[in-house]
Image (spheres, rainbow, N blue to C red):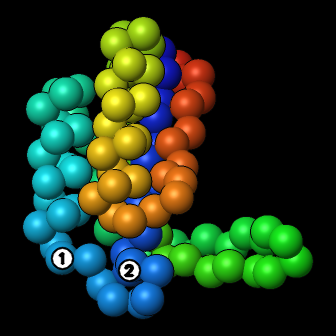
Amino acid sequence: MKEYDLYLPLTDNDGHPFAARMFRSVQNELLSQFGGVTFFPQPNEGLWQMAGVTYHDEIVIYRVITPHTAKARRFFRSYKEKLMNDFGQLEVLIVERDVETF
């Protein structure tokens, strides 16, 4: 069983908030693809450094759990490109981890 966390910024690179419909669209797509999704709507702070500069983002997290790893990986490779384009990002973080459910 795999768990996937998808991290999305709340604002564009100029600090303007993304429309709520963009996040509803992500939620609906993940629900459609995986039959369930957990959404962590509270803002989380992300910090990272590159070339000596510290960057800051407020993000939200979506989580799905699936036993269909190959299918999920194919989906996320394609969907990541769409999200990078839709949200105007050079990168979108998607984390995969092994989980056990009971």
Q: What element carries label 2?
A: loop
Left or right of 7: which side holds 52? right
Determine whether, in the image, residue 51 is placed left or right of residue 71: right
- Dot 2, how many residues are within 10 Å of its Cα: few (below 14), some (14-19), or many (20+)? some
Above or below, 75 relative to 81: above
Q: Could you say which quadrant of the image residue 82 lies in?
A: top left
User: Separation of disc 1 and disc 2 at Cα?
Assistant: 9 Å
User: Which residue is tagged 2?
Assistant: 11
Q: Nearer the viewer, residue 82 or 56?
A: 82
Q: In this view, does 44 lie above or below 36?
A: below
- What percent of the width, then of the height, locates residue 10? 37, 75
Tell me the quadrant of the picture where the C terminus can be found: top left
**What residue is rendered at 20% in x and 50% in y?**
27
Question: Where residue 19 is drawn, which disc sits there?
Answer: 1
Q: Does dot 1 land on a helix, a strand or a loop?
A: loop
Residue at the location (73% across, 69% down)? 48
Amino acid type of disc 2?
Answer: Thr
**Which label's residue is closer to the chain start, 1 or 2?**
2
Which dot marks residue 94? none
Q: For the point 52% across and 58% down, which residue is it?
A: 90
With respect to residue 24, does 98 lie above or below?
above
Q: How many marks?
A: 2
Query: Residue at 18% of width from left, 64% of height from top?
Result: 22
- Residue type at mark 1 is Ala
Instruction: Give percent across and percent down for residue 83.
Output: 33, 51
Label 1: few (<14), some (14–19) or many (≥20) C-alpha neighbours in 10 Å = few
Residues tagged 1 and 2 counted as in contact (Cβ below 8 A): no
- Using the image as rendered, state which of residue 60 and residue 13 is in the foreground: 13
- Residue 61 visible? The answer is no
Q: Can residue 55 be seen in this view?
A: yes
